[in-house]
Image (cartoon, helix red, strand yellow):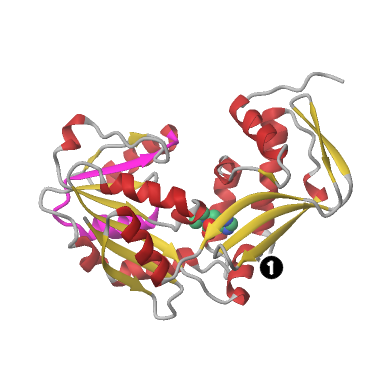
């Protein structure tokens, strides 16, 4: 047997770690290679996947009101690369905005999107920050003393555990001169809406999920057969959480970084958590992290909330 080529040792290390647990796991952050990012884009326009279009609708309908949260001479700091339509809706409404800071882990993506925004908004100072907001949010010296409004859209917070979410909100609350936070959060709702949103009829979400195995094969030299894993979305009532799994359709063994991983038929790899919230759980998170809730803006069907927090 040839020695497999490993081009991503961090991924290999994390996968070996996750796949050696009793409930095998892979981290959701690894979904977003080029193919995974394209598949996620495709997910956002699926008929079953309501969050993106619902959040965009809320932002459009309440753009001026949300934009008015920007303090005088305020910096608009987004957790995310600033690639989205959501950013543009708020930038368009923030007529006095001078400084926009997209913060993202992917440097190439950030720089590329920053350049695009500079051409679209020539009066705007676009200051991209390459950072992992889960570990450190260090701002350039020139911005430290400026007032700040933070934007964290997309229900990305849903990927975090309760404890991680509260930790992140607490760290955002303690940023120097922060005045507010605009948070996108997906709400608890009946499973006949939730499950199809994560298990669409056309199989795009299944392809997105299986792409993790394709990526592992390419970047760690593993030999997963992705077709031998079935996509599944489960609702955990106690955790208010959608779980995505890849379920082995047979007893099988996979080679990964010199180890052999055994799967029983029906055994799963847990690949993602997507937490859903209630007005109560959002209020509780605010209390635990030192924020005040100013407003919870929802679509008419209360599928999604854009929460306005003040410091
Ligand atoms: C990007 C984390 C908000 O949880 O809805 C979509 C990711 N996974 N379909 C979500 C996702 C499967 C998405 N977030």
Report the span colored magenta. Answer: 83-106
Q: Is 233 placed above or below 2 here?
A: below
Tell me residue 8's x, y (percent).
61, 27
Q: Residue furthest bottom?
A: 300
Res 83 visible: no
Residue located 26% across and 37% down the image: 127
Tell me residue 236's x, y (percent).
62, 64
In-image side of 270 versus 119 (left or right): right
Tell me residue 271's x, y (percent).
64, 49
Q: Residue furthest front?
A: 288
Q: Quadrant of ligand 1?
A: bottom right
Quarter-wise, where is residue 278 in the image?
bottom left
As helix, strand or loop, the secondary structure at mark 1 comes to: loop
Q: Which is nearer the eye, 73 or 179? A: 179
Res 272 visible: yes
Name the residue carrying label 1.
Answer: 201
Q: Is 18 placed above or below 45 here?
A: above
Judge whether residue 94 is colored magenta: yes
């Amino acid at each position: 047997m040839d020695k497999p080529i490993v081009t991503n040792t961090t991924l290999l290390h994390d996968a070996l770690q996750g796949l050696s647990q009793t409930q095998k796991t892979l981290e959701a952050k690894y979904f977003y290679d080029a193919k995974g990012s394209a598949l996620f884009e495709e997910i956002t326009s699926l008929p079953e996947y309501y969050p993106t279009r619902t959040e965009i609708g809320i932002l459009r309908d309440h753009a001026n009101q949300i934009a008015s949260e920007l303090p005088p001479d305020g910096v608009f700091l987004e957790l995310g690369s600033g690639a989205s339509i959501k950013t543009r809706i708020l930038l368009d409404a923030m007529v006095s905005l001078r400084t926009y800071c997209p913060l993202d882990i992917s440097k190439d993506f950030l720089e590329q999107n920053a350049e695009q925004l500079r051409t679209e908004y020539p009066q705007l100072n676009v200051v991209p920050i390459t950072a992992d907001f889960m570990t450190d949010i260090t701002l350039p010296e020139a911005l430290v003393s400026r007032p700040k409004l933070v934007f964290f859209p997309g229900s990305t917070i849903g990927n975090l555990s309760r404890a991680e979410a509260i930790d992140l909100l607490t760290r955002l609350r303690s940023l120097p001169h922060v005045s507010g936070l605009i948070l996108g959060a997906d709400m608890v709702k009946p499973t006949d809406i939730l499950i199809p949103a994560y298990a669409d009829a056309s199989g795009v979400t299944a392809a997105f999920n299986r792409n993790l195995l394709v990526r592992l094969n390419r970047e760690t030299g593993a030999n997963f057969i992705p077709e031998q894993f079935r996509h599944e979305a489960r609702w955990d009532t106690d955790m208010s959480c959608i779980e995505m799994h890849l379920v082995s359709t047979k007893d099988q063994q996979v080679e990964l970084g010199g180890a052999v991983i055994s799967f029983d038929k029906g055994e799963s790899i847990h690949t993602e958590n997507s937490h859903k919230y209630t007005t109560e759980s959002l209020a509780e998170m605010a209390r635990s992290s030192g924020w005040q809730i100013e407003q919870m803006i929802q679509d008419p069907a209360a599928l999604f909330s854009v929460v306005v927090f003040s410091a």
